[in-house]
Image: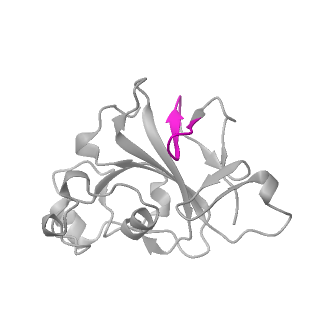
């Protein structure tokens, strides 16, 4: 699979070796070529050859909690488009429900509970329009907020970047 590059190179992120995450030091930009973290595998540019990569979308999932130095904790993933954001997050072991993680506290993807709430920081052009269910549940929320269970990301041949703020009601920092 392809590799993931962070631009500008490495000064923007500092890898945290105790867990698969990056420390945010500036504006988030993802692009192919440097390093990829996936729940199933980790590859670097030295592991890749000149083979053509299948289309995929690069994600930066920003935790609502800050790292000890005050910067956001960012999880980097890549996935094929045409899937619901909820499935991409769960497959990538990204915290989706926070305090509502127990099965009895969420609707399991039906779009009725609102516990899979995320904020789209960048890449909203790759997301499906809000569903009628989302419009109903999120009528008093900012336009950048989405239900991960109702949001389809791109198409199978899509390429791009999406930055997602996890649990926006619990975040401890503001986006510019």
Instruction: Please say if 61 is above or below 17.
Output: below
Q: Quadrant of residue 105?
A: bottom left
**Residue 11 appears left or right of 109:** right
Tell me the magenta residue range: 15-27
Residue 122's x, y, as percent? 47, 48
Q: Quadrant of residue 170?
A: top left
Residue 81's x, y, as percent? 53, 71
**Residue 81 appears left or right of 105:** right
- In this view, the residue farthest toward the right is 50
**Residue 37 or residue 24, whichever sits in front:** 37
**Residue 105 appears left or right of 117:** left
Residue for point 28% across, 71% down = 131
Residue 119's x, y, as percent? 34, 49
Question: How many marks can you see?
Answer: 0
- What colouring method underlies this structural image? one colour
Tell me the quadrant of the picture where the N terminus can be found: bottom right
Magenta span contains residue 65: no
- In this view, the residue farthest toward the left is 104
Instruction: Please say if 40 is above or below 82.
Output: above
Magenta span contains residue 20: yes
- In this view, the residue farthest toward the front is 18
Tell me the quadrant of the picture where the C terminus can be found: top left
Residue 136's x, y, as percent? 16, 65
Residue for point 49% across, 62% down = 126
Residue for point 21% across, 50% down = 141
């Amino acid at each position: 699979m392809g590799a993931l590059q962070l631009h500008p190179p490495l000064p923007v992120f500092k890898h945290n070796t105790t867990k698969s995450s990056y420390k945010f030091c500036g504006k988030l930009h993802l692009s192919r070529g440097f390093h990829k973290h996936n729940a199933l595998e980790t590859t670097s540019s030295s592991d890749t050859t000149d083979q053509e990569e299948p289309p995929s979308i690069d994600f930066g999932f920003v935790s609502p909690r800050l790292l000890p130095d005050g910067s956001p904790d960012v999880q980097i993933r890549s996935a094929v488009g045409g899937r619901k954001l909820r499935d991409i997050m769960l497959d990538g072991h990204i915290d989706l429900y926070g305090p509502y993680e127990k099965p009895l506290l969420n609707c399991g993807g039906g779009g009725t509970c609102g516990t899979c709430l995320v904020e789209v920081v960048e890449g909203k052009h790759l997301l499906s329009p809000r569903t009628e269910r989302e419009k109903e549940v999120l009528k008093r929320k900012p336009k950048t907020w989405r239900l991960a269970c109702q949001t389809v990301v791109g198409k199978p041949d899509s390429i791009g970047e999406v930055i997602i703020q996890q649990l926006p009601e619990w975040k401890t920092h503001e986006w510019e």
